[in-house]
Image (spheres, coloured by chain):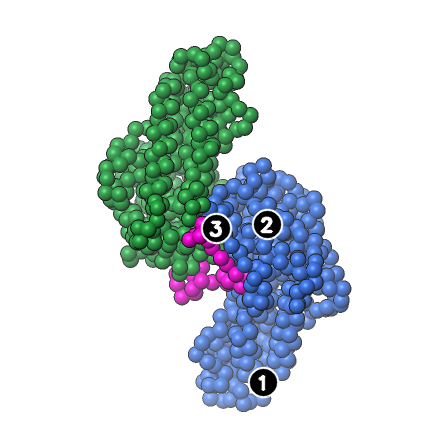
Chain colours: A green, B blue
Amino acid sequence: MCGTDSPASINKGSLTSANGNGTRSPTCSSDRVLNLEQGDPSVFQSYWSKMEDKCTMVISGSQLMSYISDFTTLCWFMEPEFEEAVRRLHRVVGNAVVDDRYIVVGTGSTQLYQAALYALTSPGGPEPVSVVSAAPYYSAYPEETDYLRSRLYKWAGDAYEFDKNGTGPYIEVVNSPNNPDGTLREAVVKNRGDEGKLIHDLAYYWPQYTPIIRPADHDIMTFTFSKSTGHAGSRIGWAIVKDKEVARKMSKFIEMSTLGVSKDSQQRAAKIMGVICDGYKNFKSDELFFEHTRRVMAERWERLRQVVDRNQVFSLPKYPKQYCLFSGELIEPYPGFAWLEAKEEEEEIDSQKVLRGCIKVQGRTGSRFGVAQKYVRVSLLSNEEVFNQFLERLSTIKSISNGH
Amino acid sequence: MCGTDSPASINKGSLTSANGNGTRSPTCSSDRVLNLEQGDPSVFQSYWSKMEDKCTMVISGSQLMSYISDFTTLCWFMEPEFEEAVRRLHRVVGNAVVDDRYIVVGTGSTQLYQAALYALTSPGGPEPVSVVSAAPYYSAYPEETDYLRSRLYKWAGDAYEFDKNGTGPYIEVVNSPNNPDGTLREAVVKNRGDEGKLIHDLAYYWPQYTPIIRPADHDIMTFTFSKSTGHAGSRIGWAIVKDKEVARKMSKFIEMSTLGVSKDSQQRAAKIMGVICDGYKNFKSDELFFEHTRRVMAERWERLRQVVDRNQVFSLPKYPKQYCLFSGELIEPYPGFAWLEAKEEEEEIDSQKVLRGCIKVQGRTGSRFGVAQKYVRVSLLSNEEVFNQFLERLSTIKSISNGH
């Protein structure tokens, strides 16, 4: 299953490892499983540790007690400071158009995705609207779409398949840069007049992960505090929406789903976004947020590619350099996940099992993303110690098989 | 429609007011509408203002960043400090059994209600499970049940009706004390073996609103930070659950719905609950939380009953005194809402319209709660100024009609 002493080789379908004894090599395992299945963004924590004073949030016992932020606005549970901070951050980064657009706050982009499905469908249709996304698609879309067995919408799988064979009204989710594979994407279902609607999930469209090639300007765009700054525990996301009625329906969904969104977390997000923007205004910070995080991601990718190239067991996608409007340079994407493909030609190879069995690394199998299990997604957003451990263990894999 | 000078009288179906000119009396209206439709719990803010120092929450920029609180537990996104605080608070108050029970945190009890529906149903049944609650029922249940047109469950209205004529599997929501009418309740659908399941919504089962007659001990009980301490803006609720699999499914629902619950708000809730419990441990506080809030609610109800008795236009429910285990006294309920019934016999009288038209008070009509529109629910949880204004305006109504 794995071996440190043998030359790089792949034993198709074999139960034996390259070192010939069929058991785990002691040099490629350790007792602790590294959980790199989720994209928990711990990588950014060290930056925020250095910024503690500026970012500390203080909330007294009597603040933020009301359900209501501003009843005269469409999204009445959104803190005005949060909305302002979101608009300001996008203006500083240049990754999305915010002028003349509505902002809707959500409990993470997970909730906003569902709010968008609700807003784009109506009761009374003969069939639920088909929801599609190009494979490999974000693994949570199918279950987030189907868990309540709604009559409004249903998961219909790969958008490429739907483009060929699908009929009727549909919603295509365009995830760009795409989770799991990091590619910049556009809609794939060919225009069918009024039948198709789009949701753009832009969770990773930030300068630490990708060149900012243009200010995104789509009907519904969702973003999340988790991936932009790394504050996943706050469960804050937002949507930028062109159409007023769609924004109103999304807000209504959030009202019925959770009666608003934590104000404590909205205020904290506003504060932290403000610190980032102040940094770019004053240029006083030692290292600005996106420069720091991009550098860390670039270093991780460089080290990862070295290990992957050296042991020749997996391959990684190649990304073209593109001109980044934010940095003013031609730069490469550095996605938050490694999308590893087993080099073995056998489609049935189970790369998740290989990682788990050989080096006790928990990734997420390609089959959860609608593709073959020879693919596995591994988070690159862990803290430094876990990332180093991952590379160390990955470097010990010299061959894989599918048997255990 | 309203008049200050005339004696108390009710003009059935008449468009004229008691003072005979058919127009709004200037003494019973003011330009500002008092929004008492929602139960925004501002009444408790003054207490927390006095406790600022003890309750202030401080969160540095690098804290609470992970999605995960404890991956080894069933509800992996629940902060351990929050769970401990919830158990401690219930032990101090004695309003619910928590030993050998699972706790599940949610984004308010709104989300937990939906999590419970999900946990109590399964895909593949021939028909959606009927969800019922005795009228007058909480106005949000119908839309929270039906907005996604689930095939798992559907709103089926008044539990009394279902008890008479309904068939098949059902879930009964028992809201006690009941919103809108403040009564202590038990399930009304007669036991039908395995066909029926119960959700107990105990949002108001706290000593400021009601005598604590026993530690509640039901299969699924939901509570909310909004109504217990008044911190609605934090969107924190919790469920106490007997069955492990039900608790697991509820957690799974919250994972799919919002990928967890704001940690900032969980920690803040833990801190505030801790301050309440410390008060009861040390008895050092000038006035303890539930004693203070009960006194305020008692005073409001006394003043409200005086006004309502005096002008003879509406009636309020009478509540029996019961022995409260928490205070050790025989006490009356002081619900968070006034459930006003027009004394006029005419069923069609629209009390919401009367309040809005005559005194610019926005309540919520009985028809939203599954009963006649001669009922209207008005929040008693506003701040002092708004409550005083409400009473002042209410005292000016001397007669009502249904015509405008």
Dot 3 amino acid type: Ser
Residue at mark 2 shares a chain with residue at mark 3? yes
Element at label 1 = loop
Which comes sooner in the sequence, label 2 or label 3?
3
Where is residue B272 shown, x and y percent of the image?
59, 57
Determine the CA span between mark 2 and mark 3: 18 Å
Q: Quadrant of residue B49?
A: bottom right
B41 left or right of A182?
right
- Of pointers 2 and 1, the one earlier in the residue sequence: 1
Q: Which mark is residue B9?
A: 1
Instruction: Determine the image quadrant of residue B6.
Output: bottom right
Looking at the rendering, the stretch of residues picked out in magenta corresponds to: A52-77
Residue B362 versus residue B64 in the image, above or below: below
Mark 1 Cα-neighbour bin, 10 Å: few <14, some 14–19, many ≥20: some
Chain to which the residue tagged by mark 1 belongs: B
x%, y% of residue A224? 40, 47
Q: Are marks 2 and 1 in contact (CB under 8 Å)?
A: no
Disc 2 residue type? Phe
Q: Which residue is mark 3?
A: B60
For this orientation, the residue located farthest to the top is: A20
Give the residue drawn at x 37%, y 28%: A303
> In whole angstroms, how far apart are the C-alphas of marks 2 and 1?
53 Å
Q: Is residue A85 above or below residue B298?
A: above
Asked whether A70 falls inside the magenta stretch, the response is yes
User: Residue B190's x, y, as percent?
Assistant: 69, 52
Q: CA distance from mark 1 to mark 3?
A: 61 Å
Amino acid type indicated by mark 1:
Ser
| Between A18 and A141, the one nearer to me in the picture | A18
Q: Nearer the viewer's eye, disc 1 or disc 3? A: 3
Q: Secondary structure at mark 3?
A: loop
Looking at the picture, does residue A266 appear above or below residue B49?
A: above
Q: Residues within 10 Å of mark 3 (few under 14, many from 20)?
A: some
